[in-house]
Image (cartoon, rainbow, N blue to C red):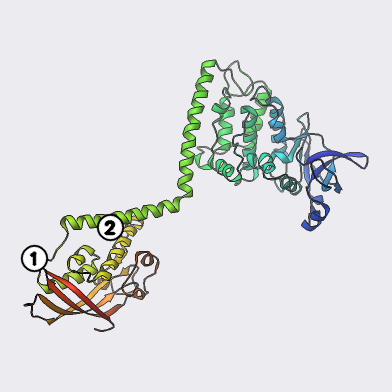
Amino acid sequence: MNGIFRFEYGGRKVLGLDTGLSAEAFARSRLGFLAAGTGWLVPPGSLPVGQPGPWRPGGIEEMAVNGRPGPVMVVWGPDFAGLSLDEIADQGDGPAPCNAPGALAALAAWVRARAALPLEGRPLPWPGAALVDEKAETVLFLPEAAVRRVFDAGGAGVWINKAERWSHPDYSGEEADVFTAAALLYRALSGSPPYPCRDRDVLREDIREGVFTPPRLAAPGISAEAAALITAALSPRAKLRTGRPLLADFARLFAAEAAGGVAGSAAGTAGFFRDIGREERLALEAERKRFLQKREKTVKAKRFLSRNRTAILAVLGAVLAAALVAGSVIRARLDGPSTRGMDAAAVVESYYRAITAMDHETAAACVTGGAGKDDINMITSLYVVSKVRQAYEAQTAFISPEEWRESGGGVSAKAVFGIDGLRLEGIDTDESDGRLGYRAKYLFFNPYPESGGNTAAPDAENKAPLPLPAGIPCSDELALEKDKKGLWHIAEIRRAYGLN
């Protein structure tokens, strides 16, 4: 019985719980407290009369156990003849009414017994830890700590088959009892567990998301009341239109079945099922196949998106950034700005205004031969960061120095970026050789001053602005050249910081 068995001890029958540990390993693990655990023995008629009584281990014995390579420590206690509830539910291969009566009777006894237990210290509703006698009258709930050790000794497969397949990882109290009752009733009526996966992580996902085949498709002909009760108990809280069922609802269902018919079933039928014709059965089977195919695709897509959400958002951000840059390049080629109609001074002024506006297109149109490359890379990166933040956060990331002063000039929640107080001075005014020179002095507001004005997008997005915006004094010497079309362009920029 997977670690729970009866044997002779001291001339009498006792019930043993196999810890799977040698005496030395048992002592190292300090598991002597397992002999002090308390279970519950619930006799028939506990409700409304009578009370469940405690079941306490009698001691711990080292002994040989079938399947173990050497002697192991066994926790033993008063004898009890019965099978665990999961074993009873698994007896037979077909759905009700072929093999279900024994399982239904045992489950009805379990529901009655769970309701009889005290709320304080009630053990978890693992079916592998509940033994039901052959008459389906008396139920023994074994001590939780000792059963945990038995399941641990059996491995992951035992944990899944005797506990986790039937238990919701997030529920407690009566809500947990109701979930287990519904899962076991589903198994008894359909011939399969609602959550058959054997991978623990996937199994828990299935349970939390309510990934089960509806009872009417899993057990053709099931009564409407039974199907509705099971569905409501197994469905996630978010999908419930009404409150979650109670143990009393399952008790009433079993009482109605014992009386010869479930309330709400069609006339002339009895038990949990109604008679269905061949055509209806074939239609339900076809609907079940369609449901399973659709569900598989939906679950896979949902979990792929959930598990790869960060990567997908990163890819979408990169695609958005690339699209913004690509769109800017295409627009620049089609109808981009130029210096047509500008004199040399206007070209210089336009260049610095473009920096403040993060207008990399206009800035690029004002230069030639690689001049201002660092400035253009910087404002291009900040332009992309600004647009991505606007898309995700619906707010402006940067403001100009002029906007900052108009807002009061204090600490700003937004980054201040741009050129302020630009002053131009001609230092080579003879354009006969097609060249001119200017000196530009200004304050450069950069929220990332340590970058030296060479801000990369990934760093810029992660660094926090200064508490109080401050402009950096700058002095640039610019050389301008006239191209073959007679348009002026900045050919060289030599910049000094701290001079103004």
| Disc number placed over residue 18 in the picture, else none | none
Give the residue number, with chain letter if any, for mark 1: 485
Q: Residues within 10 Å of mark 1 (few under 14, many from 20)?
A: few
Q: Position of residue 158 (x, y in %)?
A: 69, 42
| Horizontal and vertical percent position of residue 432 | 6, 77
Tell me, yes or no, whether the two marked residues, 1 and 2, touch with CB atoms within 8 Å.
no
Whether residue 212 is situated above or below residue 323 in the rendered picture: above
Quarter of the image for residue 272 reads top right
Q: Residue furthest left?
A: 432
- Secondary element at tag 1: loop
Q: Is 400 left, or right, of 256 in this rendering?
A: left
First in sequence: mark 1 vs mark 2: 2
The answer to whether 214 appears left or right of 86 in the picture is left
Can you say which quadrant of the picture contains the N terminus?
top right
**Residue ID for mark 2:** 325
Q: Is residue 440 left or right of residue 404?
A: left
- Marks 1/2: CA distance? 28 Å
Residue 403 visible, this angle: no
